[in-house]
């Protein structure tokens, strides 16, 4: 018998290493063992019991596991339960905290994903002179979305409240219920499409005039309907009006929403809609002001 066989801490470590033998480094095996209970859904056990190994390998690399671990230690996450949205840049998960559900957006860290997104950072005066290394670019993107969401909320726009961020992980308000996330405008039909269109134009106008931002990816794919209220999501690519492509992005945003309303049977003129956004700013909703 080996002289160390009866040591409980050695036995626990050996069990952990066998259980997570697919993780190569011992320190990450120990860390993963520590946070395993917080990844119940991801590991296909617990209340939700979903698992997709391809998703796990794509999303939860070593750096991401460390970031999740730290956020759990801070009390920002208790468990990560199941995916609610999957995209080429990020996966969004339903997560549980001691104050209710939240959405955890985890950005992918592969080089190919962010190759085309630098144009939304270059030219934004808030991010001048920062490192252009790939992983740092991803972290900048997360901080950018956090700041954009906070600025929009401070001016009364209905976007998820950003709660915390670390490296490539963003925690924000969950928009949905126990059955799942709220549907996207693309997925549903509405009884009053022209009223929806006017509200969305107001959003673009407030964002442009009052927030000094343009969303830059405004479409029915990034608009949720929750309890008859419209919520706009995915603000990572949003840029300030000082960005050299800001006006181009604004025209594209208005064009997409005009295309949407015209597919609902209306005949809305793009030039008139753009003029309304540019010339007729809407008073922002009441909300305490803060930083961005």
Image (cartoon, helix red, strand yellow):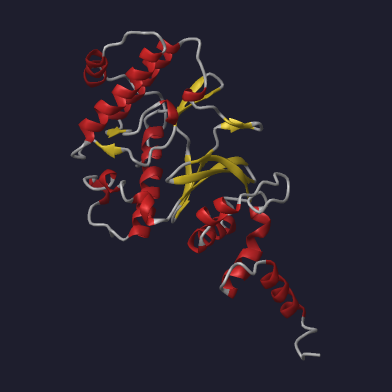
Relative to 189, say whether 7 is above or below.
below
Where on the picture, by quarter, is residue 217? Answer: top left
Residue at 36% over, 40% down:
148
Residue 65, percent across and down?
A: 54, 60
Relative to 86, say whether 14 is above or below.
below
Q: Report the side of 161 relative to 218 (left or right).
A: right
Residue 283 visible in the shown view: yes
Residue at 41% over, 44% down:
146
Residue 274, percent across and down?
A: 24, 19
Q: Report the side of 2 relative to 236 (left or right).
A: right
Where on the picture, by quarter, is residue 211? Answer: top left
Along the viewing direction, whichever of 20 and 171 lies nearer the viewer: 20
Q: Quadrant of the N terminus?
A: bottom right
Number of marks present in the image shown: 0
**Residue that extends furthest to the left in the rendered view of this protein:** 244
Q: Report the side of 24 relative to 250 (left or right).
A: right
Residue 159, percent across and down?
A: 44, 32
Relative to 194, say whether 116 is above or below.
below
Residue 189, percent across and down?
A: 51, 16
Q: Quadrant of the C terminus?
A: top left
Residue 205 visible in the shown view: no
Along the viewing direction, whichever of 15 and 173 lies nearer the viewer: 15
């Amino acid at each position: 018998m080996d002289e160390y066989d009866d040591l409980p801490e050695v036995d626990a470590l050996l069990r952990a290493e066998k259980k997570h033998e697919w993780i190569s480094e011992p320190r990450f095996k120990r860390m993963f063992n520590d946070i395993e209970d917080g990844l119940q859904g991801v590991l296909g056990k617990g209340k939700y019991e979903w698992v997709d190994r391809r998703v796990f390998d794509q999303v939860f690399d070593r750096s991401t596991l460390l970031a999740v671990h730290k956020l759990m230690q801070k009390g920002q996450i208790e468990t990560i339960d199941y995916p609610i949205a999957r995209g080429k840049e990020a996966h969004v998960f339903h997560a549980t905290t001691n104050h209710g559900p939240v959405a955890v957006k985890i950005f992918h860290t592969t080089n190919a994903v962010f190759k085309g997104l630098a144009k939304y950072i270059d030219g934004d005066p808030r991010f001048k002179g920062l490192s252009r290394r790939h992983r740092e670019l991803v972290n900048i993107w997360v901080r950018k979305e956090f700041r954009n969401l906070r600025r929009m909320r401070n001016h009364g726009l209905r976007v998820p409240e950003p709660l915390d961020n670390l490296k490539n992980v963003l925690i924000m308000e969950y928009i949905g219920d126990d059955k799942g996330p709220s549907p996207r405008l693309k997925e549903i039909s509405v009884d009053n499409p022209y009223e929806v269109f006017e509200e969305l134009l107001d959003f673009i106008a407030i964002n442009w005039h009052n927030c000094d931002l343009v969303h830059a990816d405004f479409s029915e794919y990034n608009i949720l309907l929750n309890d008859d209220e419209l919520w706009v999501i995915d603000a990572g690519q949003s840029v300030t009006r000082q960005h050299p492509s800001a006006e181009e992005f604004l025209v594209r945003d208005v064009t997409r929403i005009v295309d949407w309303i015209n597919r609902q049977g209306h005949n809305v003129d793009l030039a008139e809609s753009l003029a309304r956004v540019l010339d007729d700013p809407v008073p922002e909703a009441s909300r305490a002001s803060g930083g961005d």
